[in-house]
Image (spheres, rainbow, N blue to C red):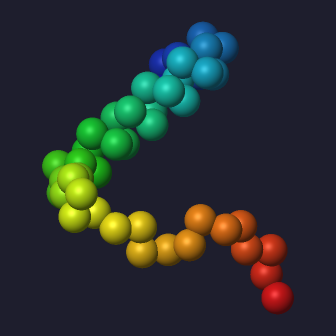
Amino acid sequence: MAELFSKGQFTQGLIEGIQSAGKALSEHFPHQGDADENELPDEISFGS
């Protein structure tokens, strides 16, 4: 990501950084298929 950013390739850097983070997270938190539940609401909270 840093290498791509230094070349001005911000979009590709973000894409690869997010993919890398997703891969690392999936090793510790694998997808459970249909058993996966969205525990949090999808609505945007603007605070109180």
Q: Percent from the top left, x then y, of residue 5?
A: 59, 21
Asked whether residue 6 is in view, the answer is no
x then y, percent, for residue 3: 49, 19
Q: Quadrant of the C terminus?
A: bottom right
Residue under the image location 50 percent in, 74 percent down: 40
Which residue corresponds to the image point at 80% horizontal and 74% vertical from the top-left?
Answer: 46
The answer to whether one can see residue 45 in this image is: yes
Name the one closer to the observer, 9 or 45. 45
Q: Is residue 39 left or right of residue 25?
A: right
Residue 35 percent coordinates (x, y) = 22, 64
- Quarter where residue 14 is shown: top right
Query: Which residue is found at the position 45% from the left and 37% from the top?
Result: 18
* Camera-side residue of 15 and 10: 15
x and y percentages locating residue 13 in the rendered image:
53, 23
In the image, residue 27 sits, relative to residue 20, either above or below, namely below
Task: Please name whichever residue, 2 or 46, is drawn nearer the observer in this view of the structure.
Answer: 46
The number of callouts visible is 0
**Res 43 quadrant in image:** bottom right
Q: Front-most of 31 and 29?
A: 31
